[in-house]
Image (cartoon, rainbow, N blue to C red):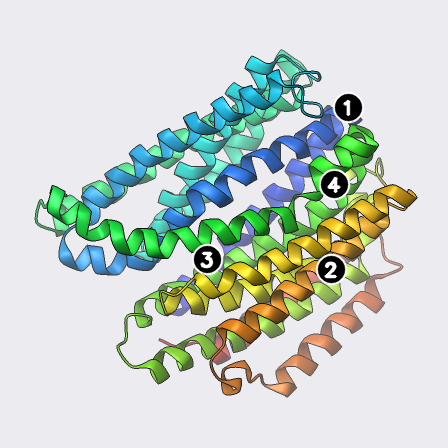
Amino acid sequence: MNKSAVLTLGIGRLLQIAIVFLTYRAVTDVLPQDEVGFFFLLQALAGFFGLIVVNPVGTFLNREIHGWEKSGFLRPGLKAFLGFSWLAAIFAGFLIAALSLFGVGSLGAHEPWVQTSFTTLVMVSGATIANTFIPLLNILERRFSFVVLTVVSQALALGFSYVVVLRSGAHASNWMLATGAVQIAFGLFAFGLLVRKVSSDSPPNSLSTAHMKEMAAPLWSFAAPIAIANFAVWGLMQGYRPLVENFAGLGALSIIGLGLGLASSITASFEALVHQVFLPVFYRRSHSEDLKTRERNWNHLWRACVPSYFGLVVVLMGLSHHFVDVLTGGSYPQAGLYLAIGVGAEFLRMIGNLVVLYAQSERNMKPTRLPYYIGAAVAFAGSLYAIHIGELQYVAYSLIIGQGAAAAFLIKTVITSKDMLKLNILSMIRFLVVPSVLVYLAKDVPAPVALGGVALGMGILTIHYWWQVREK
Protein backbone atom coordinates (compact mmCIF):
# COMPACT_ATOMS: atom_id res chain seq x y z
CA MET A 1 0.00 0.00 0.00
CA ASN A 2 1.44 3.40 -0.97
CA LYS A 3 1.78 6.45 1.26
CA SER A 4 -1.19 8.28 -0.25
CA ALA A 5 -3.50 5.33 0.47
CA VAL A 6 -2.36 5.13 4.11
CA LEU A 7 -2.71 8.90 4.46
CA THR A 8 -6.19 8.89 2.91
CA LEU A 9 -7.41 6.11 5.19
CA GLY A 10 -5.76 7.68 8.23
CA ILE A 11 -7.33 11.10 7.70
CA GLY A 12 -10.69 9.49 7.01
CA ARG A 13 -10.54 7.44 10.19
CA LEU A 14 -9.55 10.46 12.30
CA LEU A 15 -12.57 12.32 10.97
CA GLN A 16 -14.79 9.32 11.70
CA ILE A 17 -13.51 9.10 15.29
CA ALA A 18 -14.22 12.81 15.70
CA ILE A 19 -17.77 12.20 14.47
CA VAL A 20 -18.17 9.32 16.95
CA PHE A 21 -17.09 11.65 19.75
CA LEU A 22 -19.51 14.35 18.61
CA THR A 23 -22.31 11.77 18.39
CA TYR A 24 -21.89 10.70 21.99
CA ARG A 25 -21.73 14.32 23.10
CA ALA A 26 -24.89 15.16 21.15
CA VAL A 27 -26.79 12.09 22.39
CA THR A 28 -26.01 12.83 26.03
CA ASP A 29 -26.85 16.52 25.53
CA VAL A 30 -30.26 16.22 23.84
CA LEU A 31 -31.65 12.94 25.19
CA PRO A 32 -32.88 12.44 28.78
CA GLN A 33 -31.13 9.74 30.80
CA ASP A 34 -33.83 7.10 30.24
CA GLU A 35 -33.75 7.79 26.51
CA VAL A 36 -29.97 7.38 26.53
CA GLY A 37 -30.55 3.98 28.11
CA PHE A 38 -33.16 3.12 25.46
CA PHE A 39 -30.67 4.30 22.80
CA PHE A 40 -28.22 1.62 23.93
CA LEU A 41 -31.00 -0.98 24.13
CA LEU A 42 -31.98 -0.24 20.51
CA GLN A 43 -28.34 -0.54 19.49
CA ALA A 44 -28.18 -3.95 21.14
CA LEU A 45 -31.31 -5.13 19.31
CA ALA A 46 -30.04 -3.96 15.93
CA GLY A 47 -26.65 -5.46 16.71
CA PHE A 48 -28.29 -8.82 17.40
CA PHE A 49 -29.73 -9.04 13.89
CA GLY A 50 -26.61 -7.58 12.33
CA LEU A 51 -24.31 -10.14 13.90
CA ILE A 52 -26.47 -13.24 13.58
CA VAL A 53 -28.36 -12.73 10.32
CA VAL A 54 -26.41 -10.26 8.19
CA ASN A 55 -22.75 -10.49 9.23
CA PRO A 56 -22.23 -14.15 8.24
CA VAL A 57 -23.38 -13.51 4.66
CA GLY A 58 -21.52 -10.19 4.48
CA THR A 59 -18.33 -11.88 5.68
CA PHE A 60 -18.69 -14.48 2.94
CA LEU A 61 -19.10 -11.64 0.44
CA ASN A 62 -15.89 -9.98 1.68
CA ARG A 63 -13.97 -13.25 1.57
CA GLU A 64 -15.01 -14.11 -1.99
CA ILE A 65 -15.18 -10.62 -3.50
CA HIS A 66 -11.92 -10.81 -5.45
CA GLY A 67 -12.75 -14.22 -6.85
CA TRP A 68 -16.21 -13.05 -7.96
CA GLU A 69 -14.69 -9.97 -9.57
CA LYS A 70 -12.35 -12.13 -11.64
CA SER A 71 -15.11 -14.56 -12.63
CA GLY A 72 -17.53 -11.80 -13.62
CA PHE A 73 -20.18 -12.71 -11.05
CA LEU A 74 -19.72 -9.77 -8.71
CA ARG A 75 -22.66 -7.73 -10.01
CA PRO A 76 -25.34 -10.45 -9.54
CA GLY A 77 -23.77 -11.28 -6.17
CA LEU A 78 -24.16 -7.66 -5.04
CA LYS A 79 -27.76 -7.57 -6.19
CA ALA A 80 -28.51 -10.82 -4.36
CA PHE A 81 -27.04 -9.39 -1.14
CA LEU A 82 -29.11 -6.23 -1.49
CA GLY A 83 -32.28 -8.30 -1.68
CA PHE A 84 -31.14 -10.33 1.31
CA SER A 85 -30.59 -7.08 3.26
CA TRP A 86 -34.21 -5.98 2.80
CA LEU A 87 -35.52 -9.38 3.87
CA ALA A 88 -33.32 -9.41 6.98
CA ALA A 89 -34.54 -5.94 8.00
CA ILE A 90 -38.21 -6.90 7.55
CA PHE A 91 -37.65 -10.02 9.64
CA ALA A 92 -36.03 -7.90 12.37
CA GLY A 93 -38.98 -5.50 12.41
CA PHE A 94 -41.53 -8.30 12.76
CA LEU A 95 -39.60 -10.02 15.55
CA ILE A 96 -39.24 -6.82 17.58
CA ALA A 97 -42.96 -6.19 17.08
CA ALA A 98 -43.69 -9.62 18.58
CA LEU A 99 -41.38 -9.00 21.55
CA SER A 100 -42.98 -5.59 22.10
CA LEU A 101 -46.49 -7.06 22.10
CA PHE A 102 -45.37 -9.58 24.74
CA GLY A 103 -43.95 -6.71 26.82
CA VAL A 104 -40.35 -7.96 27.07
CA GLY A 105 -38.48 -5.46 29.23
CA SER A 106 -39.07 -1.89 28.10
CA LEU A 107 -40.26 -2.98 24.67
CA GLY A 108 -43.89 -2.01 24.22
CA ALA A 109 -43.93 0.01 27.46
CA HIS A 110 -41.38 2.73 26.80
CA GLU A 111 -43.00 3.74 23.49
CA PRO A 112 -45.59 2.34 21.03
CA TRP A 113 -44.56 -1.04 19.63
CA VAL A 114 -45.09 0.12 16.05
CA GLN A 115 -42.48 2.85 16.52
CA THR A 116 -39.91 0.47 18.02
CA SER A 117 -40.39 -2.21 15.35
CA PHE A 118 -40.23 0.28 12.47
CA THR A 119 -37.15 1.91 13.99
CA THR A 120 -35.46 -1.49 14.19
CA LEU A 121 -36.35 -2.23 10.56
CA VAL A 122 -34.78 1.04 9.39
CA MET A 123 -31.74 0.63 11.64
CA VAL A 124 -30.99 -2.90 10.46
CA SER A 125 -31.47 -2.10 6.77
CA GLY A 126 -29.38 1.06 7.01
CA ALA A 127 -26.53 -0.55 8.93
CA THR A 128 -26.55 -3.59 6.63
CA ILE A 129 -26.49 -1.70 3.35
CA ALA A 130 -24.08 1.06 4.38
CA ASN A 131 -21.69 -1.13 6.37
CA THR A 132 -21.42 -3.66 3.54
CA PHE A 133 -21.36 -1.74 0.28
CA ILE A 134 -19.29 1.25 1.40
CA PRO A 135 -16.44 -0.89 2.87
CA LEU A 136 -16.46 -3.00 -0.32
CA LEU A 137 -15.10 0.06 -2.11
CA ASN A 138 -12.03 -0.13 0.11
CA ILE A 139 -11.63 -3.90 -0.29
CA LEU A 140 -11.67 -3.34 -4.06
CA GLU A 141 -9.07 -0.59 -3.44
CA ARG A 142 -11.24 2.41 -4.34
CA ARG A 143 -10.07 4.09 -1.16
CA PHE A 144 -10.86 7.72 -1.90
CA SER A 145 -14.50 6.94 -2.70
CA PHE A 146 -14.69 4.77 0.42
CA VAL A 147 -13.33 7.48 2.72
CA VAL A 148 -15.48 10.27 1.27
CA LEU A 149 -18.70 8.26 1.44
CA THR A 150 -17.97 7.02 4.95
CA VAL A 151 -17.14 10.43 6.41
CA VAL A 152 -19.91 12.34 4.64
CA SER A 153 -22.57 9.75 5.48
CA GLN A 154 -21.62 9.69 9.16
CA ALA A 155 -21.44 13.48 9.39
CA LEU A 156 -24.83 13.91 7.73
CA ALA A 157 -26.32 11.16 9.90
CA LEU A 158 -25.16 13.03 13.00
CA GLY A 159 -26.46 16.38 11.78
CA PHE A 160 -29.79 15.03 10.50
CA SER A 161 -30.40 13.00 13.68
CA TYR A 162 -29.68 16.02 15.86
CA VAL A 163 -32.12 18.21 13.91
CA VAL A 164 -34.83 15.54 13.89
CA VAL A 165 -34.59 15.08 17.67
CA LEU A 166 -34.78 18.82 18.28
CA ARG A 167 -37.82 19.21 16.01
CA SER A 168 -39.69 15.94 16.59
CA GLY A 169 -38.97 15.13 20.22
CA ALA A 170 -36.07 13.92 22.37
CA HIS A 171 -36.59 10.21 21.76
CA ALA A 172 -33.94 7.62 21.01
CA SER A 173 -36.09 6.13 18.24
CA ASN A 174 -36.19 9.49 16.43
CA TRP A 175 -32.40 9.61 16.48
CA MET A 176 -32.09 6.05 15.21
CA LEU A 177 -34.66 6.55 12.44
CA ALA A 178 -32.83 9.57 11.09
CA THR A 179 -29.46 7.82 11.23
CA GLY A 180 -30.85 4.73 9.50
CA ALA A 181 -32.41 6.79 6.70
CA VAL A 182 -29.09 8.47 5.89
CA GLN A 183 -27.30 5.10 5.98
CA ILE A 184 -29.78 3.62 3.51
CA ALA A 185 -29.30 6.52 1.09
CA PHE A 186 -25.49 6.37 1.12
CA GLY A 187 -25.41 2.58 1.11
CA LEU A 188 -27.52 2.52 -2.05
CA PHE A 189 -25.26 5.13 -3.61
CA ALA A 190 -22.22 2.94 -2.89
CA PHE A 191 -24.09 -0.03 -4.36
CA GLY A 192 -24.64 2.01 -7.53
CA LEU A 193 -20.93 2.85 -7.75
CA LEU A 194 -19.99 -0.81 -7.38
CA VAL A 195 -22.49 -1.98 -9.97
CA ARG A 196 -21.39 0.65 -12.49
CA LYS A 197 -17.74 -0.27 -11.97
CA VAL A 198 -18.47 -3.95 -12.45
CA SER A 199 -20.62 -3.19 -15.49
CA SER A 200 -17.73 -1.39 -17.19
CA ASP A 201 -14.97 -3.81 -16.13
CA SER A 202 -16.67 -7.21 -16.44
CA PRO A 203 -18.84 -9.21 -18.80
CA PRO A 204 -22.59 -8.97 -18.00
CA ASN A 205 -22.86 -12.36 -16.26
CA SER A 206 -25.92 -13.30 -14.24
CA LEU A 207 -26.64 -15.86 -11.57
CA SER A 208 -28.19 -18.90 -13.21
CA THR A 209 -30.08 -21.46 -11.15
CA ALA A 210 -27.17 -23.88 -11.51
CA HIS A 211 -24.66 -21.28 -10.37
CA MET A 212 -26.82 -20.33 -7.37
CA LYS A 213 -26.96 -23.99 -6.33
CA GLU A 214 -23.21 -24.23 -6.78
CA MET A 215 -22.70 -21.18 -4.50
CA ALA A 216 -25.26 -22.27 -1.89
CA ALA A 217 -23.14 -25.07 -0.42
CA PRO A 218 -19.97 -23.01 0.26
CA LEU A 219 -22.10 -20.08 1.46
CA TRP A 220 -23.94 -22.27 3.94
CA SER A 221 -20.82 -24.09 5.14
CA PHE A 222 -19.05 -20.73 5.59
CA ALA A 223 -21.88 -18.60 6.98
CA ALA A 224 -23.76 -21.05 9.22
CA PRO A 225 -20.88 -21.52 11.69
CA ILE A 226 -20.42 -17.74 11.81
CA ALA A 227 -24.11 -17.24 12.60
CA ILE A 228 -23.96 -19.86 15.36
CA ALA A 229 -20.82 -18.30 16.80
CA ASN A 230 -22.17 -14.76 16.47
CA PHE A 231 -25.14 -15.58 18.67
CA ALA A 232 -22.63 -16.04 21.47
CA VAL A 233 -20.58 -13.06 20.26
CA TRP A 234 -23.62 -10.83 20.68
CA GLY A 235 -24.22 -12.25 24.14
CA LEU A 236 -20.60 -11.58 25.02
CA MET A 237 -20.50 -8.03 23.63
CA GLN A 238 -24.01 -6.66 24.18
CA GLY A 239 -26.00 -9.24 26.10
CA TYR A 240 -25.45 -7.29 29.31
CA ARG A 241 -27.66 -4.48 28.01
CA PRO A 242 -31.04 -6.29 28.14
CA LEU A 243 -29.99 -7.83 31.47
CA VAL A 244 -29.15 -4.48 33.06
CA GLU A 245 -32.28 -2.86 31.59
CA ASN A 246 -34.53 -5.63 32.92
CA PHE A 247 -33.08 -5.80 36.42
CA ALA A 248 -31.73 -2.29 37.05
CA GLY A 249 -33.66 -0.03 34.64
CA LEU A 250 -32.87 2.30 31.77
CA GLY A 251 -31.13 4.81 34.04
CA ALA A 252 -28.50 2.28 35.10
CA LEU A 253 -28.12 1.11 31.52
CA SER A 254 -27.47 4.69 30.40
CA ILE A 255 -24.35 4.89 32.62
CA ILE A 256 -23.03 1.38 32.03
CA GLY A 257 -23.93 1.45 28.34
CA LEU A 258 -22.25 4.81 27.92
CA GLY A 259 -18.94 3.75 29.46
CA LEU A 260 -18.79 0.34 27.81
CA GLY A 261 -20.24 1.79 24.60
CA LEU A 262 -17.49 4.39 24.44
CA ALA A 263 -14.88 1.69 24.92
CA SER A 264 -16.47 -0.34 22.14
CA SER A 265 -16.94 2.57 19.74
CA ILE A 266 -13.43 4.00 20.11
CA THR A 267 -11.67 0.64 19.83
CA ALA A 268 -13.94 -0.47 16.98
CA SER A 269 -13.16 2.74 15.10
CA PHE A 270 -9.44 2.12 15.48
CA GLU A 271 -9.86 -1.56 14.59
CA ALA A 272 -11.73 -0.53 11.45
CA LEU A 273 -8.80 1.69 10.41
CA VAL A 274 -6.41 -1.24 10.87
CA HIS A 275 -8.69 -3.42 8.74
CA GLN A 276 -8.95 -0.75 6.06
CA VAL A 277 -5.17 -0.54 5.83
CA PHE A 278 -4.29 -4.23 5.97
CA LEU A 279 -7.31 -6.36 5.02
CA PRO A 280 -7.36 -5.70 1.25
CA VAL A 281 -3.90 -7.29 0.95
CA PHE A 282 -4.77 -9.96 3.53
CA TYR A 283 -7.90 -11.08 1.67
CA ARG A 284 -6.13 -11.07 -1.68
CA ARG A 285 -3.29 -13.26 -0.37
CA SER A 286 -5.75 -15.56 1.39
CA HIS A 287 -6.44 -17.10 -2.02
CA SER A 288 -2.95 -18.67 -2.08
CA GLU A 289 -2.98 -22.46 -2.41
CA ASP A 290 0.03 -22.84 -0.08
CA LEU A 291 -0.77 -23.27 3.65
CA LYS A 292 2.54 -21.80 4.86
CA THR A 293 1.98 -18.73 2.72
CA ARG A 294 -1.46 -18.23 4.29
CA GLU A 295 0.02 -18.68 7.77
CA ARG A 296 2.70 -16.06 7.06
CA ASN A 297 0.03 -13.79 5.61
CA TRP A 298 -1.94 -13.96 8.86
CA ASN A 299 1.15 -13.53 11.04
CA HIS A 300 1.94 -10.29 9.22
CA LEU A 301 -1.55 -9.04 10.14
CA TRP A 302 -1.04 -10.19 13.73
CA ARG A 303 2.31 -8.38 14.06
CA ALA A 304 0.87 -5.20 12.54
CA CYS A 305 -2.21 -5.10 14.78
CA VAL A 306 -1.40 -6.32 18.28
CA PRO A 307 1.19 -3.68 19.33
CA SER A 308 -0.97 -0.80 18.09
CA TYR A 309 -4.03 -2.29 19.86
CA PHE A 310 -1.99 -2.49 23.05
CA GLY A 311 -0.96 1.15 22.83
CA LEU A 312 -4.58 2.22 22.34
CA VAL A 313 -5.61 0.33 25.47
CA VAL A 314 -2.93 2.03 27.58
CA VAL A 315 -4.16 5.47 26.47
CA LEU A 316 -7.86 4.77 26.97
CA MET A 317 -7.34 3.28 30.42
CA GLY A 318 -5.08 6.09 31.53
CA LEU A 319 -7.30 8.90 30.24
CA SER A 320 -10.74 7.34 30.63
CA HIS A 321 -12.13 10.17 32.74
CA HIS A 322 -10.76 12.75 30.29
CA PHE A 323 -12.66 11.04 27.49
CA VAL A 324 -15.91 10.92 29.45
CA ASP A 325 -15.62 14.56 30.52
CA VAL A 326 -15.15 15.73 26.95
CA LEU A 327 -17.73 13.44 25.36
CA THR A 328 -20.54 13.94 27.89
CA GLY A 329 -19.85 17.44 29.18
CA GLY A 330 -19.36 16.03 32.68
CA SER A 331 -22.96 14.72 32.87
CA TYR A 332 -21.99 11.06 33.36
CA PRO A 333 -18.82 11.02 35.51
CA GLN A 334 -19.49 7.43 36.67
CA ALA A 335 -19.09 6.23 33.07
CA GLY A 336 -15.30 6.75 33.25
CA LEU A 337 -14.89 3.64 35.38
CA TYR A 338 -16.82 1.52 32.89
CA LEU A 339 -14.79 2.93 30.00
CA ALA A 340 -11.50 2.00 31.72
CA ILE A 341 -12.68 -1.53 32.50
CA GLY A 342 -14.40 -2.02 29.14
CA VAL A 343 -11.22 -1.25 27.22
CA GLY A 344 -9.63 -4.39 28.65
CA ALA A 345 -12.51 -6.47 27.32
CA GLU A 346 -12.28 -4.75 23.95
CA PHE A 347 -8.58 -5.55 23.62
CA LEU A 348 -9.32 -9.24 24.11
CA ARG A 349 -12.24 -8.98 21.67
CA MET A 350 -9.93 -7.56 18.99
CA ILE A 351 -7.43 -10.37 19.62
CA GLY A 352 -10.23 -12.86 19.07
CA ASN A 353 -11.26 -11.10 15.87
CA LEU A 354 -7.74 -11.48 14.49
CA VAL A 355 -7.85 -15.21 15.14
CA VAL A 356 -11.24 -15.43 13.42
CA LEU A 357 -9.72 -13.79 10.34
CA TYR A 358 -7.38 -16.77 10.03
CA ALA A 359 -10.37 -19.10 10.23
CA GLN A 360 -11.93 -17.07 7.41
CA SER A 361 -8.73 -17.41 5.40
CA GLU A 362 -8.97 -21.19 5.77
CA ARG A 363 -12.74 -21.19 5.04
CA ASN A 364 -13.20 -23.18 8.24
CA MET A 365 -15.38 -21.32 10.72
CA LYS A 366 -16.59 -24.29 12.77
CA PRO A 367 -13.81 -24.08 15.40
CA THR A 368 -14.90 -20.51 16.24
CA ARG A 369 -18.27 -21.53 17.67
CA LEU A 370 -17.49 -23.16 21.02
CA PRO A 371 -14.99 -20.52 22.27
CA TYR A 372 -17.55 -17.75 21.98
CA TYR A 373 -20.20 -19.79 23.78
CA ILE A 374 -17.77 -20.42 26.61
CA GLY A 375 -16.97 -16.71 26.82
CA ALA A 376 -20.64 -15.72 26.64
CA ALA A 377 -21.56 -18.16 29.42
CA VAL A 378 -18.84 -16.71 31.64
CA ALA A 379 -19.91 -13.12 30.93
CA PHE A 380 -23.61 -13.94 31.41
CA ALA A 381 -23.01 -15.63 34.75
CA GLY A 382 -20.82 -12.76 35.91
CA SER A 383 -23.39 -10.16 34.89
CA LEU A 384 -26.19 -11.98 36.72
CA TYR A 385 -24.04 -12.17 39.84
CA ALA A 386 -23.17 -8.48 39.60
CA ILE A 387 -26.83 -7.52 39.29
CA HIS A 388 -27.78 -9.86 42.15
CA ILE A 389 -25.34 -8.29 44.62
CA GLY A 390 -25.92 -4.76 43.31
CA GLU A 391 -22.32 -4.16 42.21
CA LEU A 392 -22.83 -3.20 38.57
CA GLN A 393 -19.14 -2.57 37.89
CA TYR A 394 -18.73 -6.33 38.07
CA VAL A 395 -20.73 -6.47 34.84
CA ALA A 396 -17.76 -4.86 33.11
CA TYR A 397 -15.26 -7.13 34.83
CA SER A 398 -17.27 -10.18 33.74
CA LEU A 399 -16.88 -9.03 30.13
CA ILE A 400 -13.10 -9.04 30.52
CA ILE A 401 -13.13 -12.59 31.86
CA GLY A 402 -15.57 -13.72 29.17
CA GLN A 403 -13.61 -12.14 26.32
CA GLY A 404 -10.39 -13.57 27.72
CA ALA A 405 -11.85 -17.07 27.83
CA ALA A 406 -13.14 -16.73 24.27
CA ALA A 407 -9.81 -15.44 22.94
CA ALA A 408 -7.83 -18.19 24.69
CA PHE A 409 -10.01 -20.97 23.33
CA LEU A 410 -10.01 -19.41 19.85
CA ILE A 411 -6.23 -19.45 19.79
CA LYS A 412 -6.20 -23.03 21.01
CA THR A 413 -8.70 -24.32 18.45
CA VAL A 414 -7.92 -22.18 15.36
CA ILE A 415 -4.20 -21.38 15.31
CA THR A 416 -2.20 -24.22 13.77
CA SER A 417 1.35 -23.19 14.67
CA LYS A 418 2.91 -21.34 17.61
CA ASP A 419 5.12 -19.47 15.13
CA MET A 420 2.00 -17.69 13.87
CA LEU A 421 1.72 -15.87 17.23
CA LYS A 422 5.23 -14.41 17.19
CA LEU A 423 5.49 -10.71 17.97
CA ASN A 424 8.34 -8.23 17.93
CA ILE A 425 9.12 -7.65 21.63
CA LEU A 426 10.72 -4.25 20.97
CA SER A 427 7.54 -3.11 19.24
CA MET A 428 5.43 -4.18 22.22
CA ILE A 429 7.75 -2.32 24.59
CA ARG A 430 7.54 0.76 22.39
CA PHE A 431 3.73 0.67 22.50
CA LEU A 432 3.85 0.35 26.29
CA VAL A 433 6.43 2.99 27.12
CA VAL A 434 5.45 5.80 24.73
CA PRO A 435 1.70 5.77 25.55
CA SER A 436 2.47 5.51 29.29
CA VAL A 437 4.70 8.57 29.12
CA LEU A 438 2.10 10.50 27.11
CA VAL A 439 -0.63 9.61 29.63
CA TYR A 440 1.58 10.66 32.55
CA LEU A 441 2.35 14.01 30.94
CA ALA A 442 -1.32 14.61 30.10
CA LYS A 443 -2.99 13.60 33.37
CA ASP A 444 -3.03 17.13 34.86
CA VAL A 445 -3.63 18.94 31.56
CA PRO A 446 -7.16 20.14 30.63
CA ALA A 447 -9.01 17.25 28.99
CA PRO A 448 -9.40 18.64 25.42
CA VAL A 449 -5.72 19.64 25.24
CA ALA A 450 -4.58 16.36 26.77
CA LEU A 451 -6.59 14.24 24.35
CA GLY A 452 -5.43 16.24 21.35
CA GLY A 453 -1.77 16.01 22.30
CA VAL A 454 -1.89 12.30 23.09
CA ALA A 455 -3.81 11.58 19.88
CA LEU A 456 -1.15 13.39 17.85
CA GLY A 457 1.68 11.51 19.53
CA MET A 458 -0.01 8.14 19.17
CA GLY A 459 -0.91 8.87 15.56
CA ILE A 460 2.73 9.53 14.67
CA LEU A 461 3.91 6.43 16.54
CA THR A 462 1.29 4.17 14.96
CA ILE A 463 1.66 5.37 11.37
CA HIS A 464 5.44 5.09 11.59
CA TYR A 465 5.11 1.53 12.87
CA TRP A 466 2.62 0.51 10.20
CA TRP A 467 4.88 1.94 7.53
CA GLN A 468 7.73 -0.20 8.89
CA VAL A 469 5.70 -3.43 8.79
CA ARG A 470 3.75 -2.76 5.60
CA GLU A 471 3.69 -5.18 2.70
CA LYS A 472 3.09 -3.85 -0.79
Q: Secondary structure at mark 2?
A: helix
- In the depicted structure, whether residue 317 falls above or below residue 135: below
* Disc 1 from disc 4: Cα separation: 13 Å
What amino acid does circle 2 point to?
A: Ile
**Real-space Cα separation, disc 4 to disc 3, in angstroms:** 27 Å
| Residue type, mark 3 in image | Leu
Determine whether 242 is above or below 282 in the image. above
Check disc 1 and give the amino acid type. Pro
Q: Name the residue type under label 4.
A: Leu
Q: Nearer the viewer, residue 363 or 287?
A: 363
Residue 32, disc = 1
For the C terminus, which image quadrant?
bottom left
Mark 2 vs mark 3, CA separation in Å: 30 Å
Q: Which residue is mark 4?
A: 258
Tag 1 and tag 4, C-beta contact below 8 Å: no
User: Mark 4 or mark 3: which comes first in sequence?
Assistant: 3
Q: Which residue is mark 3?
A: 9
Among numbered discs 3 and 1, the one appearing first in the sequence:
3
The residue lying at 71 percent from left, 43 percent from top is: 240
User: Dot 2: within a 10 Å radius of its alpha carbon, few (fewer than 14), some, or many (20 or more) residues?
Assistant: many
Q: Kindly identify which residue carries mark 2.
A: 400
Sooner in the amino-acid sequence: mark 1 or mark 2: 1
C-alpha distance separating marks 1 and 2: 29 Å
Quadrant of the image for the N terminus?
bottom left
